[in-house]
Image (cartoon, grey):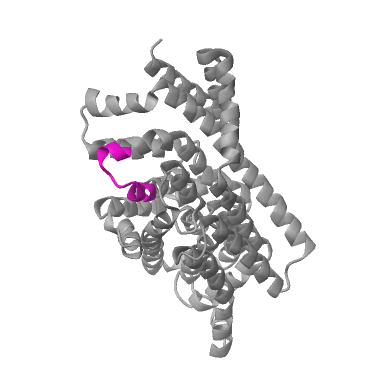
Amino acid sequence: MGHEMIAALMFASMMVMLITGQRVFAAIGAVAAIAALLLWGEGGGEMAFSAAMKLMKWYPLLTLPMFIYMGFMLSESGIADDLYRMFHVWFGPVRGGLAIGTIGLMVVISAMNGLSVAGMAIGATIALPELLRRNYDKIMVTGVIQAGSSLGILVPPSVVLVLYGMIARQPVGQLWLAGVFPGLLMAGLFIVYIAVRCRLQPHLGPVLPAGERRIPLGEKIALLRAGILPFLIFFLMTGLFLMGYTSLVESSAVGALSATLAALIRGRLTRKVMEETVRKTLGVSCMFMWIILAALCFGAVFDGLGAVRAIEGFFLEKLGLGPWEVLILMQLSFLLMGTFLDDTAMLVIVAPLYVPLVKVLGFDLIWYGVLYTITCQIAYMTPPFGYNLFLMRAMAPPEIGLGDIYRSIIPFVLVMVVALALVMIFPELALWLPEQHYGL
C-alpha cells in the first residue's frame, strides 16, 4: 500500500470515529498510535512520548490556561452582568436595541477572554432570558447570541489565533492585530442587519417601555463606569504586549491577575467564584492539552508518510488548480469539517498540512490565519452538527427547540460569508494594522 493510500486511510478512520461520537482527542490519538505501531513497529511507540515531551516544553502554551481563567473569572464574578446592564440602558430605546447591545457586550467579552464558549455562556445566561422577557423574537435573538459569541475566536486575545501562531510559526502580535478590523467589521455587519430587520419588522425587537426609558442622564453616565474595568484589563493585557513591555506569556498572566483584582475591587471574589473559575479553567485547559497532544502525534505520523508533499503534488500537479482555486477548496473543507469538529480540533488536525501549502501558493500566512478563523466561525454554526448549535441547545430555555436554533443562524451565517468574502477580496482589512504597527 502506498503512502498516499495510508494517509487517506488514516484520515478516513479518524473521521469515522469522530462521526460515531468518540471524543476528539481519543479519535485522533488512537488512529495516530495504531498507525505508528503498524508502520514502524516498536519504534513507533516513541512518537507519542516525543509528542508529549514537545507539548510539555511548549512554553507559549502557558497562555491558554491564563486566558481561559481570565474569561471564567469575569463571567463568574458578575462583571459581565454589569456590562449588560450598561448596554441595556443605553440601547433600550432603539428598535432592536437590546439585541444590538448584546452584540456590543459580546465584542467586549471577546476582547477579555478569547473564547467563544465563554461568550456563549454569558449570552445564554444573562442576555437571552432578558431579551425573551422583553418580547424579542426568540429565533432572532438565539441567532444574535450565537453570532456574537463566535467573535471570541477572532477578536484579540483570540486563543485560536494563539494556537495558529504556534503551529504556523507566525507572530501572535501580528495575528491579534490582523483580527481587529475583520472582527469589528463582522460585528458591525451584525448590528446593521439587526437594525434594518427590526426597522422593517418592529415586532421582532420592540423598544423598552416608556417607564423604563426615563432614567436620569446622571445615572446613565454612571453606568458607563461598568466598562472601565474591562477596558483597563484589555489595555493591561493586550496593550502592554503590543507595545513590547510584556511577552505573550507575561501578557496572559497580567490578564489573569487583572481579572482577579477586578473581581476583588468589586467585592465579588468569593470562595465559590474562585472554585468555579478554577474548576472550569482546569476542565477546558485539559481538553485543549489532550487535543494538542493527540494532534502532535497524528501530525508526526502524517509528516513521516510525506503526506504534506503528496497533498501539494495532488492539488498543483495532478489537478492543475490555480492558487485561488486551491485556497477556496481548503476553506470549503473547513466548512465541511466544522459540522462535526470544533475550531481547535480542525486547527491542530489540518493546519500542519495546509500551512505549508498556503506558503507554497504565495499567500500571506497572517492573512490566512484570519481567513481560517472566520471560516471556523461559519463552520461552528452550520447545521446539521455545528458545535455551537448543540452548545446553544444545552444552554437555551425549553421553549427554544433545535429547529428554532437551526433557523436562527441562517441570516447570520450569510452575513459572515459576506465578511469572509470581503477579507479575501481586500487582504488589507487584515494586514493593514499589523503592517502599520510593526512597520512591515
Q: Which residues are magenta?
A: 358-371
Instruction: Tally the numbered discs.
Output: 0
Q: Where residue 168 sits: x, y (%)? A: 41, 42
- Residue pictured at 46% horizontal, 52% vertical: 408
Taking the view exactly as shown, the residue that stands out farthest to the top is 1
Quadrant hosting residue 261? bottom right
The location of residue 123, given as percent across then percent down, is 57, 60
Position above or below: 243 against 296 = below
Write the residue at 71% across / 71% down. 264
Principal secondary structure, stretch drawn in magenta: helix
Residue drawn at (38%, 23%) of the image: 306
Q: Is residue 361 magenta?
A: yes
Q: Residue 80 is drawn in which quadrant?
A: bottom right
- For the question of whether residue 24 can be seen, the reply is no
Q: Is residue 329 left or right of residue 231?
A: left
Q: Nearer the viewer, residue 204 or 45?
A: 45
Residue under the point 52% across and 42% down: 387
Q: Is residue 204 magenta?
A: no
Q: Is residue 2 left or right of residue 223?
A: left
Is residue 322 visible in the rendered structure shown here? yes
Which quarter of the figure is the N terminus placed in? top left
Q: Position of residue 329 (x, y in %)?
A: 31, 35
